[in-house]
Image (cartoon, rainbow, N blue to C red):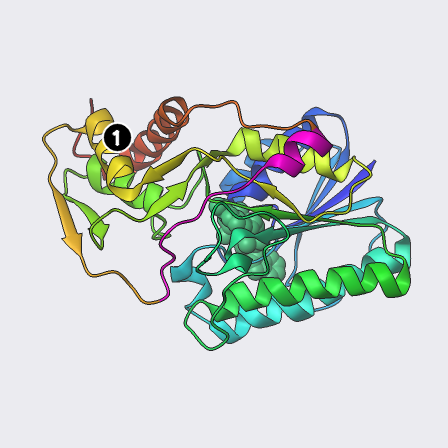
């Protein structure tokens, strides 16, 4: 098949491309390189099945494709809050442009939505039926309300225009190629530990998160895209860890002597988030397989090798 991946030079997009290229598809990667990097897709640059287009999805584009995986959107608070209006434009105009393209060429459209649509949930764990507790005017709203409207657009194109759609709600995912400076909790802890700095925990560290390793997530994407179920489907790892437990796990793997510092919790930071993955299990026969200790090791190795090339590593255990 000919498959378009928007945001294909980013963290998740590039892992998805690796998988689709290995399966023998023709891939068009669309990216404006806001948070994505050519190094993530370098291995495919000269491959006859691969094409890279530098393009901002807030502008329309005409292409002939069979499937569209729509991932383009900055995903971490530092990046999506840097230019919140642009984040909204990417979610609204960008998603509309990609849905318009799917409608025109009758391609199947896959939306990478997020667990952030549940906001600070008052139901735990979150099933797909839960409608969320989201602040429409907060600092995170450009992203979480942006993704909610992206879901709305996707379902309206489906109902009104018969576009074939799939919607996944992604929970925290980690793995090689995450950005060093994106402020996400896993990358923060790993970078701090490798630099020999204290690990920063916001709040008392009792807030919980679930962490899905990237290869598990991509497997869920492919299963959903090629199933008959429209969604939304939660894809994430239901194993729940406190932030303090995560900090201790990274510390123990990189530098057991590192200190842990506590700082005030930012506003709108959810207390708990854990997916209910019953739908993914029953409808897609999917569940995560990579344990946190194994995924963290692979991620730490990748950060160590990237950071030692730029001379940023103090701890080399
Ligand atoms: N990583 C996670 O844990 C997670 C969790 C929930 C949802 N998601 C969603 O998955 C998708 C991918 O996330 P990621 O972690 O790979 O983030 P990322 O920042 O690494 O990737 C996003 C990519 O989109 C590109 N992009 C951004 N705006 C664009 C625009 N206007 N036009 C063209 N390209 C643009 C960026 O350059 C980047 O390559 C995002 O939609 C994100 O919201 C990710």
- Horizontally, residue 99 falls left or right of residue 146, namely right
Q: Which range of residues does the magenta coloring cover?
A: 268-284
Q: Position of residue 29 (x, y in %)?
A: 67, 46
Q: Check residue 108 for magenta coloring.
A: no
Q: Check residue 274 for magenta coloring.
A: yes
Q: Nearer the viewer, residue 197 or 130?
A: 130
Give the residue at x 63% y 30%: 219
Please give the residue where the numbered disc 1 appears in the rendered image: 249
Q: Nearer the viewer, residue 296 or 285?
A: 285
Q: Position of residue 125 (x, y in %)?
A: 49, 45
Q: Secondary structure at mark 1?
A: helix
Does mark 1's beta carbon lie closer than 8 Å to ligand 1?
no
- Horizontally, residue 154 falls left or right of residue 66, namely left
Q: Position of residue 268 (x, y in %)?
A: 37, 65
Give the residue at x 26% y 36%: 245
Q: Is residue 307 visible?
A: yes
Q: Nearer the viewer, residue 264 or 282?
A: 282
């Amino acid at each position: 098949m000919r498959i378009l991946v928007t945001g294909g030079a980013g963290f998740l997009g590039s892992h998805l491309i690796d998988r689709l290229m290995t399966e023998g598809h023709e891939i068009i990667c669309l990216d404006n390189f806001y948070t994505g990097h050519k190094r993530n897709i370098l291995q495919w640059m000269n491959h006859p099945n691969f094409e890279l287009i530098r393009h901002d999805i807030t502008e329309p584009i005409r292409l002939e494709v069979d499937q569209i995986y729509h991932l383009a959107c900055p995903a971490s608070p530092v990046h999506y809050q840097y230019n919140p209006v642009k984040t909204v434009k990417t979610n609204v105009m960008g998603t509309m442009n990609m849905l318009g393209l799917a409608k025109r060429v009758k391609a199947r459209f896959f939306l990478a939505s997020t667990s952030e649509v549940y906001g600070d949930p008052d139901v735990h764990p979150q099933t797909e039926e839960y409608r969320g507790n989201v602040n429409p005017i907060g600092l995170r709203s450009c992203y979480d309300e942006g993704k909610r409207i992206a879901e709305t657009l996707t379902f309206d194109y489906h109902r009104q225009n018969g576009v074939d759609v799939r919607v996944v709600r992604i929970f925290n995912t980690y793995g090689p190629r995450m950005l060093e400076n994106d402020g996400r909790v896993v990358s923060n802890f790993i970078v701090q530990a490798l630099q020999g700095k204290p690990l920063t925990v916001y709040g008392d560290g009792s807030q919980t998160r679930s962490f899905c390793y990237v290869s598990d997530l991509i497997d869920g994407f492919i299963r959903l895209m090629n199933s008959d179920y429209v969604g939304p489907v939660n894809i994430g790892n239901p194993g729940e860890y406190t932030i303090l437990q995560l900090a201790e796990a990274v510390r123990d793997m990189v530098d057991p002597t590192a200190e842990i510092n506590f700082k005030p919790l930012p506003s709108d930071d959810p207390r708990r988030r854990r997916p209910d993955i019953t739908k993914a299990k029953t409808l897609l026969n999917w569940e995560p397989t990579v344990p946190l200790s194994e995924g963290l090791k692979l991620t730490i190795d990748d950060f160590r090798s990237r950071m030692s090339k730029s001379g940023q590593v103090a701890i080399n255990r």
